[in-house]
Image: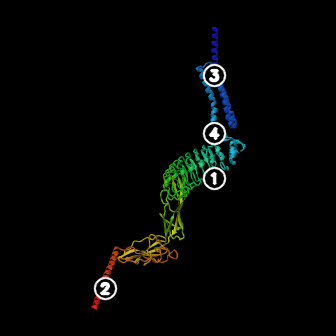
């Protein structure tokens, strides 16, 4: 009996030992087989995705089913071990087996997560996704398809990152909304007007849209990864959508209809900026773009370039065909290598003398126009054209036989029909490492001066001045005359109109103004004008608009009298008043005498 019990115990121990050794080996083999199977299925799936998305999706489910079976086998094996001999060593080995199965399943789960994040389109014909025939043909060729009616998947479209589509006749780019991995897109010289399909292509770094028919660039507002943006030769006037594209380093807006560049004020990464051929007059938004190296502002309406004064990194600057006369803001831009200032109004280039690094300088065709002047023979103008050293440049030619005596250009005997005079200059100058020709034209608009004499007559003593027709006459100093008070200048000796020097203008004829006086103690009676509203230089009643000969007096004014004259006037009035009192008293006495004699006589008669 004891022997049987002992033998039974040995069998149980042997059985437990076999299970302890055998089950982990079995699980390990199964796990390795599962991992190998999963890897093969993943590789197969990756290959087949590029060919057919639907087939790949079906095959991707197979590894999951096999893994589930392996899990069930592993769980059954673990149960058996736990029931027979749940030792610590067995528990550790079971845990390791579970981790191996979990790791083998990770590639499939990761791939499914990626697929969920990608926005895909349903497979469709190229011609359906890209309705523009020219663009559809380009996509067909890009993907190696045989026809634009071939089916294309999103995965295939995602392989397109670079497109160079110069002058392809493209009108509609709507299908490009699906090219979400595009990094470089060049659509130069097509017929595109609507760029809204580009709104979500946020991977774009390089975008070239020059030579199209674009006016609205609002779809670009969120393309914050753009580094190069070229919009040359479109119909753009509003560039506010660019305000937040702060990563841009190269921006080309040449040949558009832009006048307001304030949206560029915060694009501080800009290194190259082209604004040629627009309608810009105010460049103050550029003042803080200190990283600018190349700046092109040709063919605008710029006169003030002071905002450029602190752009110390500028090496290439183009300012041709503007209205610039003052170039002092450029004086300290010593990193300048190339400077073009053709067709402006520059007369003095001495302020450029510090630009020692210049390798290219252009100062051609300066056109300076001075304000119109009225002239008498001769006409003289002071020369203001200065070279790089601040020396005056003598005129090379002068119109209308002008002559030059430093620093004055003089014209003599100009015909009355002359509308302008001019002179030209041309001189070779050297600044920095370059030599160029500084030349241009100075033009002065002129109008023949038409003047007549105004005579100031003071009791026969006459002084004369020349006054331009239509100009105000300068008032002379008030004259003095003993015993008289000066009351003004009149246009005839007696009567006439008092001249108003603040409003009356010189007529187109000679005239005389007469000094008018009041004798002290004499009050000049007021004479009202014969014609209402007349006075000063008024047009004649016949509407001829001009006067001939001396002007006719029609009214007279009494203005100020001296204090002595006023006092004498008061005394005269007082004498008159006293005389009237005496006369009244005398009359009263006469009446009283007559009444007395009449009374006496009557008394005698009655007696």
N-term-proximal mark, 2 vs 4: 4
N-term-proximal mark, 4 vs 1: 4
Q: CA distance from mark 3 to mark 1?
A: 75 Å
Residue at which label 2 appears: 591
Expressed as whole percent of the image width and height from the top left, the position of residue 185 reads 63, 46
Q: Does dot 1 land on a helix, a strand or a loop?
A: loop
Mark 4 or 3: the one toward you:
3
> Residue 79 has which mark?
3
Location of residue 103 with respect to 404 vertically, above or below: above
> Residue 118 has which mark?
4
Expressed as whole percent of the image width and height from the top left, the position of residue 100 reads 62, 27
N-term-proximal mark, 4 vs 3: 3
Quadrant position of residue 585? bottom left
Expressed as whole percent of the image width and height from the top left, the position of residue 53 reads 68, 37
N-term-proximal mark, 3 vs 1: 3
Expressed as whole percent of the image width and height from the top left, the position of residue 227 reads 58, 45
Between 45 and 452, the residue placed more toward the observer is 45
Q: CA distance from mark 1 to mark 2?
A: 117 Å
Q: CA distance from mark 4 to mark 3?
A: 42 Å
Q: Does dot 3 land on a helix, a strand or a loop?
A: helix
Label 4 CA crowd tier, 10 Å (few <14, some 14–19, many 20+): few
Mark 1 or 2: the one toward you:
2
Location of residue 607 with respect to 412 vertically, above or below: below
Left or right: 81, with 339 as reference point = right
N-term-proximal mark, 3 vs 2: 3
């Amino acid at each position: 009996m004891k022997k049987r019990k002992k033998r039974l115990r040995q069998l149980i121990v042997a059985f437990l030992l076999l299970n302890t050794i055998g089950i982990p080996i079995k699980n390990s083999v199964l796990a390795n087989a599962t991992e190998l199977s999963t890897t093969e299925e993943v590789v197969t799936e990756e290959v087949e995705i590029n060919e057919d998305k639907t087939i790949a999706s079906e095959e991707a489910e197979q590894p999951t089913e096999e893994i589930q079976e392996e899990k069930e086998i592993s769980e059954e094996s673990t149960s058996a071990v736990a029931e027979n001999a749940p030792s610590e060593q067995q528990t550790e080995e079971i845990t390791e087996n579970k981790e191996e199965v979990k790791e083998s399943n990770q590639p499939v789960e990761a791939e499914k997560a990626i697929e969920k994040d990608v926005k895909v389109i349903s497979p469709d014909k190229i011609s359906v996704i890209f309705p523009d025939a020219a663009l559809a043909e380009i996509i067909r060729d890009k993907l190696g398809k045989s026809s634009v009616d071939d089916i294309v998947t999103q995965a295939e479209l995602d392989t397109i990152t670079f497109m160079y589509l110069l002058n392809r006749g493209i009108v509609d780019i709507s299908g490009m909304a699906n090219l979400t991995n595009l990094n470089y897109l060049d659509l130069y010289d097509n017929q595109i007007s609507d760029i809204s399909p580009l709104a979500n292509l946020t991977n774009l770094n390089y975008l070239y849209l020059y030579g199209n028919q674009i006016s609205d660039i609002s779809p670009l507002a969120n393309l914050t990864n753009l580094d190069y943006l070229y919009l040359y030769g479109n119909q753009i006037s509003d560039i506010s959508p660019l305000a937040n594209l702060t990563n841009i380093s190269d921006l080309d807006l040449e040949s558009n209809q832009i006048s307001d560049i304030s949206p560029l004020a915060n694009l501080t990464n800009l290194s190259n900026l082209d604004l040629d051929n627009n309608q810009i007059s105010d460049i103050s938004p550029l003042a803080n773009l200190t990283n600018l190296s190349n700046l092109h502002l040709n063919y605008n309406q710029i006169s003030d370039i002071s905002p450029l004064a602190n752009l110390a990194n500028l090496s290439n600057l183009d300012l041709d065909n503007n209205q610039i006369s003052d170039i002092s803001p450029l004086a300290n831009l010593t990193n300048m290598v190339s400077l073009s200032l053709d067709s402006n109004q520059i007369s003095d280039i001495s302020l450029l003398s510090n630009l020692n690094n210049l390798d290219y300088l252009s100062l051609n065709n300066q056109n300076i126009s001075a304000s119109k002047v009225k002239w008498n023979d001769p006409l003289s103008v002071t020369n203001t054209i200065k070279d790089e050293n601040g020396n005056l440049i003598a005129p090379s030619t002068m119109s209308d036989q002008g002559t030059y005596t430093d620093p004055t250009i003089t014209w003599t005997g100009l015909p009355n029909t002359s509308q302008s005079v001019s002179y030209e200059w041309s001189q070779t100058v050297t600044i920095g490492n370059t030599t160029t020709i500084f030349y241009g034209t100075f033009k002065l608009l002129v109008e023949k001066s038409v003047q007549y004499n105004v005579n100031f007559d003071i009791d026969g003593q006459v002084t004369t001045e020349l006054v331009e027709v239509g100009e105000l006459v300068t008032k002379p100093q008030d004259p003095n005359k003993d015993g008289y008070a000066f009351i003004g200048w009149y246009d005839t000796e007696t009567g006439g109109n008092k001249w108003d020097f603040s409003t009356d203008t010189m007529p187109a004829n000679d005239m005389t103004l007469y000094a008018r006086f009041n004798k002290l103690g004499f009050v000049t009676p007021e004479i009202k004008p014969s014609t209402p509203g007349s006075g000063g230089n008024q047009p004649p009643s016949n509407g001829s608009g001009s006067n001939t000969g001396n002007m006719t007096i029609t009214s007279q004014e009494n203005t100020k009298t001296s204090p002595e004259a006023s006092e004498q006037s008061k005394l005269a009035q007082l004498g008159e008043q006293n005389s009237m009192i005496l006369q009244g008293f005398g009359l009263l006495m006469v009446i009283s005498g007559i009444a007395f004699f009449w009374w006496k006589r009557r008394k005698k008669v009655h007696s």
